[in-house]
């Protein structure tokens, strides 16, 4: 089961952080359709946040079509956010991990890697490539 | 709420029980010998003049036998002090401590109204206060019965003998301790409500209660029932004469025809019934303390006038005084209810 | 949705000073509401009025639809934890629970015992020897175990260390998750409020400065920065809460329900802490209209 984190300094609303973490987990295959999301009580016990925040996050996921609440049973993932399947995502994750390793052994630090990534990201998506 | 009151009152109750038990032991240890002394004094079944002699003999023997004088005085002192102690230690902190420690915020947000909370606390603790004080009084009354009987029968100038109306005896016997306890307790609670701090409330309670206990017998008790008057010839009663220069004063401690009566005032009056204290010119040259002074004054029309309350009124006085104190206690309690429900601070 | 606490023109005065004045708000049920403000602003007075410890001088207040503390049934519906969690120092933990059972018909003893064990309290220990965090947890247990519909807490975490504070909030939120209790808690620690509150009231100098859903407040407040500009020239639907100017630049905190279209402005979101500080600042002149935003569903 996914374990949520809370970044108090990020300025992003708590419920959005939860939603984003679910998206993230789906992308890397940590969560798959059919998996159960933690109950509000479990999240609250770990993070000491308002349970309404959890409900709000799960409602948002339901609105996006990613999850569904089954009364008495819990909230479950229904599908992956992107069109691609998890196998494709796992392949790119492996590629990326390999790239990062060689960048590190070439002597690049985390800030350099981040700068390279952001530049490439901006260029790529500014070109209008989906 | 009853169980909670007991839980919070437990320690104080046990202290009081221990004190009662200790006093009971003391009385039980000394009681039997007192009873045997009384039996040996042949007061029971006495007739006429022998009663006074037997009573005086018994009381003087008692005064010389330790520890009886100490126990006697201790007992009266304890009963007189008990209401004050209860008022201070049970009454004053009852609400003051809740206000000081701010636990009222806990107590008054449970599912129970303030009225019921206070009602249970006041009633249970108040009844306990009355029971302890009256218990002390009854135990002591049983123990000191022989002494009371002897004092009633005989005249005695000794400090051990006293009539039922005499100050400490009246306060320590009968049912008045109930009233004193109720009053002192509610006085303490009220002081706590008003002052909101336990220690100042304790001090104020002691001060006011002591003042009332001094003032009541002096100024109010004598008037609880219309006093009786009597007068007689100057030489009729045993009394003490005091002459200084031309001032004459004559006081009487007891009336043989009214054993145990409470003498409110006594003194010389002239033929018109007005109080007099100056020796008239006609008798001025007679020596003080000599046998001619009294006949001379009698010839001038002087008599002795006495104002008293008969002993038969003892229980009426007891009831009235207790009722007054209980009424005061109820009034104070009512004020506390009103004050707590006002909710302004 | 019915209101957990509803006040209309509520005021409380002592002799010549007003502890609370002109207070009108409707705190929704089912929410965790934060009451923020500087010391002496009237937070404790408002909470004492809500629990029936004080009577209003002016105006009305109703709690869960009824006047506060008017009957034992009404008293049972509201739980209260006062500042510094007052307890009977010479009574043991177990005795406090027994007191709760004796005085509250709706007492859930199993819940209370479970919570005490979970928090690690020794039932035989006297309350006077507990730590601050433990006292807060015991006081919270006493309030929760009577199963109230509304729980009111007056600065419950003010004197607790960070760990104890986190544990306290955790316990509180678990209770909300389990029972759906409405909560109103006053605090001046905004970071705690951000974590747990979804409704916010800012009280300054005995008046309500702003009240509303946290998400609505954050969505409707923006930090505008741009070239120097007179705030009077802004559109009518933009209320300026805070302004600061240099000779060339203006930075404004505005409240508006409409999006900001003016391209001259750089629009940034406002954090809850910045928002609260702006409303608490007595130098800022808060526009009188619409002090309370509507409840978003």
Image (cartoon, rainbow, N blue to C red):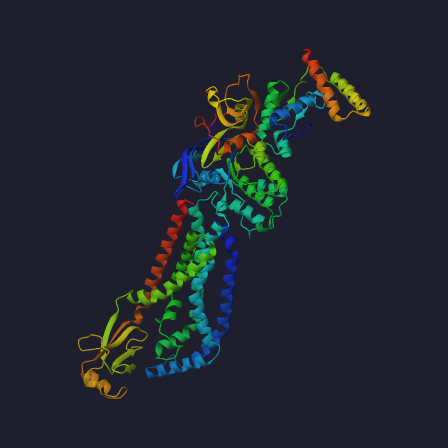
Residue at the limit of the structure toward the top, as seen here? A128
Which quadrant is the C terminus of chain B positioned in?
top left
Which quadrant of the figure has residue B165? bottom left
Residue A91: x %, y % from top left: 77, 18
Residue A16: x %, y % from top left: 61, 24
From the viewer's perspective, tell me whether residue C84 is left or right of residue C69: right
- Report whether residue B296 is seen: yes
- Report whether residue C31 is seen: no
| Residue depicted at 78% across the width and 24% down the height | A108
Question: Camera-side residue: B65 or A44?
Answer: A44
- Give the number of callouts: 0
Residue C238: x %, y % from top left: 48, 22
Question: Camera-side residue: A8 or B146?
Answer: A8
Relative to B170, residue C141 above or below: above
Relative to A36, residue A125 above or below: above
| Residue depicted at 45% across the width and 57% down the height | B200
| Residue depicted at 38% across the width and 81% down the height | B56
Which quadrant of the figure has residue B247? bottom left
From the viewer's perspective, tell me whether residue B330 is left or right of residue A60: left
Residue B303: x %, y % from top left: 22, 79
From the viewer's perspective, tell me whether residue B309 is left or right of residue B191: left
From the viewer's perspective, tell me whether residue A77 is left or right of residue B221: right
Residue at the limit of the structure toward the front, as seen here? C247
Relative to C174, residue B165 above or below: below
């Amino acid at each position: 089961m996914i374990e949520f984190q809370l970044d108090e300094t990020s300025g992003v609303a708590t419920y959005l952080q939860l939603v984003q973490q679910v998206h993230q987990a789906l992308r890397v295959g940590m969560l798959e359709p059919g998996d159960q999301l933690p109950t509000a009580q479990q999240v609250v016990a770990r993070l000491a946040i308002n349970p309404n925040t959890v409900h709000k996050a799960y409602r948002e996921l339901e609105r996006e079509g990613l999850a569904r609440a089954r009364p008495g049973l819990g909230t479950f993932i229904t599908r992956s956010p992107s069109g691609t399947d998890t196998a494709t995502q796992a392949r790119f994750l492996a590629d990326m991990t390999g790239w990062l390793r060689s960048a590190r052994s070439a002597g690049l630090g985390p800030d350099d890697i981040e700068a390279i990534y952001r530049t490439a990201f901006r260029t790529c998506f500014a070109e209008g490539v989906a | 709420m009853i169980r909670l009151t007991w839980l919070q009152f437990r320690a104080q109750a046990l202290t009081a029980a221990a004190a009662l038990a200790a006093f009971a032991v003391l009385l039980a240890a000394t009681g039997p010998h007192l009873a045997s002394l009384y039996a040996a004094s042949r007061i029971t079944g006495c007739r006429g003049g022998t009663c006074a002699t037997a009573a005086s003999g018994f009381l003087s023997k008692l005064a010389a036998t330790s520890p009886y004088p100490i126990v006697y005085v201790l007992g009266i002192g304890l009963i007189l002090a008990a209401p004050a102690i209860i008022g201070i230690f049970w009454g004053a902190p009852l609400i003051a401590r809740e206000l000081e420690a701010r636990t009222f915020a806990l107590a008054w947000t449970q599912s129970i109204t303030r009225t019921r909370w206070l009602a249970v606390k006041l009633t249970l603790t108040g009844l306990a206060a009355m029971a302890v004080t009256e218990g002390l009084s009854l135990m002591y009354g049983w123990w000191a019965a022989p002494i009371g009987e002897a004092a009633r029968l005989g005249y005695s100038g000794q400090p051990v003998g006293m009539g039922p109306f005499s100050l400490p005896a009246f306060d320590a016997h009968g049912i008045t301790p109930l009233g004193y306890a109720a009053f002192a307790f509610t006085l303490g609670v009220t002081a706590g409500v008003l002052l909101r701090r336990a220690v100042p409330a304790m001090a104020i309670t002691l001060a006011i209660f002591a003042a009332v206990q001094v003032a009541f017998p002096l100024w109010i008790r004598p008037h609880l029932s219309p006093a009786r008057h009597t007068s007689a010839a100057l030489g009729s009663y045993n009394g003490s004469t005091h002459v200084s220069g031309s001032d004459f004063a004559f006081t009487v401690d007891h009336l043989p025809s009214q054993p145990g009566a409470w003498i409110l005032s006594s003194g010389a009056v002239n033929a018109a019934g007005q109080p007099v204290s100056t020796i008239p010119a006609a008798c001025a040259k007679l020596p003080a303390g000599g046998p001619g002074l009294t006949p001379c004054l009698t010839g001038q029309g002087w008599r002795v006038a006495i104002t008293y309350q008969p002993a038969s009124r003892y229980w009426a006085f007891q009831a009235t005084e207790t009722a007054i104190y209980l009424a005061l206690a109820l009034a104070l309690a009512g004020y506390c209810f009103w004050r707590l429900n006002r909710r302004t601070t | 949705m019915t209101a957990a606490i509803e006040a209309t023109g509520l005021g409380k005065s002592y002799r010549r000073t007003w502890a609370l004045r002109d207070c009108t708000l409707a705190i929704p049920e089912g929410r965790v509401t934060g009451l923020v403000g500087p010391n002496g602003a009237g937070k404790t007075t408002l909470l004492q009025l809500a629990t029936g410890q004080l009577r209003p001088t002016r105006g009305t207040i109703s709690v869960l639809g009824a006047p506060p503390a008017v009957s034992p049934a009404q008293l049972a519906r509201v739980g209260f934890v006062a500042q510094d969690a007052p307890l009977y120092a010479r009574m043991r933990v177990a005795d406090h629970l027994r007191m709760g059972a004796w005085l509250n018909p709706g007492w859930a003893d199993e819940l209370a015992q479970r919570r005490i064990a979970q928090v690690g309290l020794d039932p035989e220990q006297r309350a006077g020897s507990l730590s601050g965090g433990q006292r807060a947890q015991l006081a919270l247990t006493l309030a929760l175990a009577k199963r109230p519909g509304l729980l009111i807490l007056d600065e419950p975490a003010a004197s607790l260390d960070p760990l104890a504070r986190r544990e306290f909030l955790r316990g509180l939120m678990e209770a909300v998750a389990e029972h759906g209790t409405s909560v109103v808690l006053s605090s001046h620690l905004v970071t705690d409020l951000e974590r747990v509150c979804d409704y916010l009231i800012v009280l300054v100098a005995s008046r309500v400065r702003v009240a509303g859903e946290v998400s609505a407040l954050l969505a409707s407040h923006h930090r505008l920065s741009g070239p120097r500009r007179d705030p009077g020239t802004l559109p009518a639907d933009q209320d300026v809460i805070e302004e600061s100017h240099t000779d060339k630049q203006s930075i404004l905190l505005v409240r508006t329900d409409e999006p900001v279209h003016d391209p001259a402005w750089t629009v940034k979101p406002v954090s809850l802490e910045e928002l609260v500080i702006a409303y608490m600042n007595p130098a800022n002149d808060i526009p009188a209209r619409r002090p309370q935003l509507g409840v978003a569903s």
